Image (spheres, grey):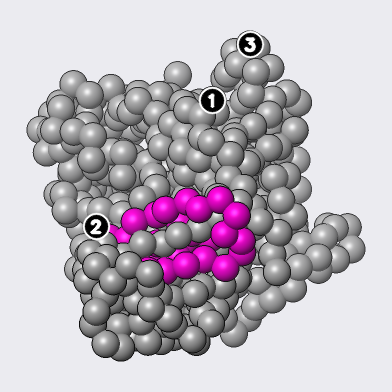
Amino acid sequence: MPTPPRSPRSTAAPQRRPQPSPGRAPRRSAPPVRRRKPRWGVRVVTTLSVVVLASAGIGHAVMTSLDADIARVDPFKDMKNRPQAGHGMNVLLVGTDGREKIGKEERRKYRLGGEPCHCTDTIMIVHISEDRERASVVSLPRDSYAVMPAHVDRTTGKRHGGHPVKLNAAYAEGGPQLTVRTVESMTKVKIDHYLEVDFTSFMRTVDVVGGVPICTADPLKDSYTGLDLPAGRHTLAGGQALQYVRARHVDGASDLGRMKRQQRFMAALVERITSSGILLNPMKFRDVARAVLGSVRADKGFGTDEMLDLGRAMRNFSPSSSEFTTVPIGRIGYVVKDVGSTLKWDPVKAERLFNALRQDRPLSAHRSRSAARIVSVAPQQIHVQVENGTRTPGLGRRVDTALASTGFRTTRAPVNAAARDVKRTVVAYDPRWDRSAKSLATALPGSELRPVEGLGATLKVIAGTDFERVRKVRAEDPGQGEAGVVRGDEVACS
């Protein structure tokens, strides 16, 4: 029998864009898109905010002025033998350090000491479907085993042949261009645009939107970043949000756990932006966009027209339109000489995942609004006794069977309740098992939670006349790849 978990109370100078040279072929307009994004997922989050905010419909002149604030890079220069383009748009979002831009006091407060690593802290592919209905975000762990293509080291000028590295080393050796080349080589997915953000951009963006709500079922504490969150709902400002998305030591999952928290944060940021009226307020939009773009670098092809196209496509975007996953890992702790411990991708599952991006297909099977809800305690860990609180024959058996088929450990022996005039279904529970009770109540839409001291580990469901159905629920899947695909509305605060 699981130990009864008691949930604590919640507490509450940029580079100018070069002018096109005479005779240059017009830029091919990118297909309209939808927004989405997650570790530095946060930095990524930050950048995608720009895309999200473009949906405000602010005029071309405003977007042109914002365009001028974006520093430019050319990650596609002289690239040959690239993968074939698929449908939709693929954006490579990378998060870099940039801690040298943050004041000493903030660096001390948020544990940002040490030297910048000049590498990518986060790497993600954001795929926007051609029909503008879906955004798929795939996190590529920075410690992924990679074989870097032949290149010239940007620091030493030395020519290197292909050699094994951790994925985040590509940026250190060859900047954005080598990063794109390495990702395309590993995934066979053609990258259409490149966006790069840093700590500063992230913190400013979170602050200018008024903070981002985050929910956690368990306390989160990380001595490395200084994160210290009790269980419950919190609104994180920029610095605290940075701690949340950087934390690697709150559990044994390290980077993989951190990426899940980044995905959760991304979903919450999108929800915050789309529901707060920011997109309808030109002045607020301008402030947020400037906060984001002040520390962003992008490819030369990502400009005013692309931002407006993306914005128009994303006007009806919501968390349920997005899906998140991490590339499937086949082997953790794969040791490589002179490289160290790496994460080796599962070749079969990873190919299936990237093929879905190339074919513009959802990463998971289509799921309707009635799909399984994410809960903190798995149904298989929850013991339930069902009682019929009405005079409807067989209702207790029907509720028991429905709960059992969803995974709850029912007694399979429903009984009649003392009161037979119950209108609203009740979930009675010992306060020591409050998390289990909330998970069970999620499966019974409209039910009432009723604490009963001393009830013990077996929860009680008293079926009322309002009972209609049992909703499918599941605990968040700790696995990776296809099994780990979640929708934005499944990881945001409910």
The answer to whether residue 472 is visible is: no
Q: Three-letter amino acid code at disc 3?
A: Glu
Q: Quadrant of residue 364?
A: bottom left
Q: Three-letter amino acid code at disc 2?
A: Val
Q: Which is nearer the N-term, disc 2 or disc 1?
A: 2
Q: Position of residue 450 (x, y in %)?
A: 42, 53
Q: Residue 239 — which label? A: 1
Q: Secondary structure at mark 3?
A: helix
Q: Secondary structure at mark 2?
A: loop
Q: Position of residue 342 (x, y in %)?
A: 77, 62
What residue range appears in magenta?
436-462
Q: Residue 105 — which label? A: 3
Q: Residue at x 15, y 27 (%)?
A: 281
Question: How far apart, in angstroms, are the residues tagged by discs 3 and 1?
Answer: 11 Å
Q: Which is nearer the N-term, disc 3 or disc 1?
A: 3
Which residue in the structure is indicated by mark 2?
Answer: 33
Q: Position of residue 453 (x, y in %)?
A: 56, 50
Comparing 461 with 51, the one in front is 461
Q: Three-letter amino acid code at disc 1?
A: Gly
